[in-house]
Image (cartoon, rainbow, N blue to C red):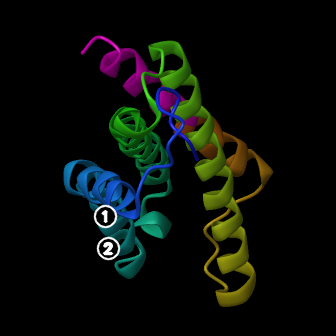
Amino acid sequence: MQTKRSGIKPTTKQLNNWILTTLREAAWAPLLVLAFYALGLAFQLFKRFPPLDIPTHFMGGVVITYFYRTAIRHSQKLVGEIPLPIQVLFAITCTATTTILWEFYENILDFLAGTHMVRGVQDTIVDLFVGLLGALVLSLIYSRR
């Protein structure tokens, strides 16, 4: 990867700094939702209260988009300025990919561990939609900063 301005590759130290800065600033958000998710599984909250799945996926979309937007913003020190529309589009694309991978995870866990997290195709579609809705909401709020 070469920077736009200098044609020089970022050093390992610069890449490490980018990763650490991003993690320090933004990793708390997805970790918080993951912790809630783990507690929900441990106490069978999603079985007891199936609608709880919807706000969890929405917040997942919000926090992972926040994480990606932070990473993209910090990456500009390495690659040069990235126009805001491209930042937003890239973050939403990364979030969409993450929501798809999360649904794969839920389906695989259902198959291997018998967890019954997926309640059918409609549940999967709603989860994907709500996660992307969270990404759009965060993008609208975050772009005003």
Q: Is residue 59 above or below residue 14?
A: above
Q: Is residue 105 above or below residue 6?
A: below
Q: Is residue 35 visible?
A: yes
Classify mark 1: helix, strand or loop.
helix
> On the image, numbered disc 1 is attached to which residue?
36
How crowded is the residue under tag 2: few (<14 C-alpha within 10 Å), some, or many (20+)?
few
The quarter of the image holding the C terminus is: top left
Residue 35 in the image, given as x and y percentages of width and height: 30, 68
Q: Are marks 2 and 1 in contact (CB under 8 Å)?
A: yes
Residue at left offset 57%, top offset 31%: 90
Q: Quadrant of residue 139?
A: top left
Residue at left offset 54%, top offset 36%: 7
Hey, what amino acid is under mark 1?
Phe
Residue at left offset 32%, top offset 18%: 141
Hey, what amino acid is under mark 2?
Leu
Residue 107 in the image, given as x and y percentages of width and height: 72, 69
Q: Of 2 and 125, which appears nearest the observer?
A: 2
Residue 143 highlighted magenta (yes or no): yes
Residue 117 in the image, given as x and y percentages of width and height: 61, 68
Q: Is residue 27 visible?
A: no
How crowded is the residue under tag 1: few (<14 C-alpha within 10 Å), some, or many (20+)?
few
> On the image, numbered disc 2 is attached to which residue?
39
Q: Quadrant of residue 73?
A: top left
Specify the farthest residue to the right: 121
Instruction: Using the numbered discs, state the Cα–Cα distance from disc 2 to disc 1 in whole angstroms.
Output: 5 Å
Magenta stretch: dominant secondary structure: helix
Q: Of 44 and 14, which appears nearest the observer?
A: 14
Residue range in magenta is 132-145
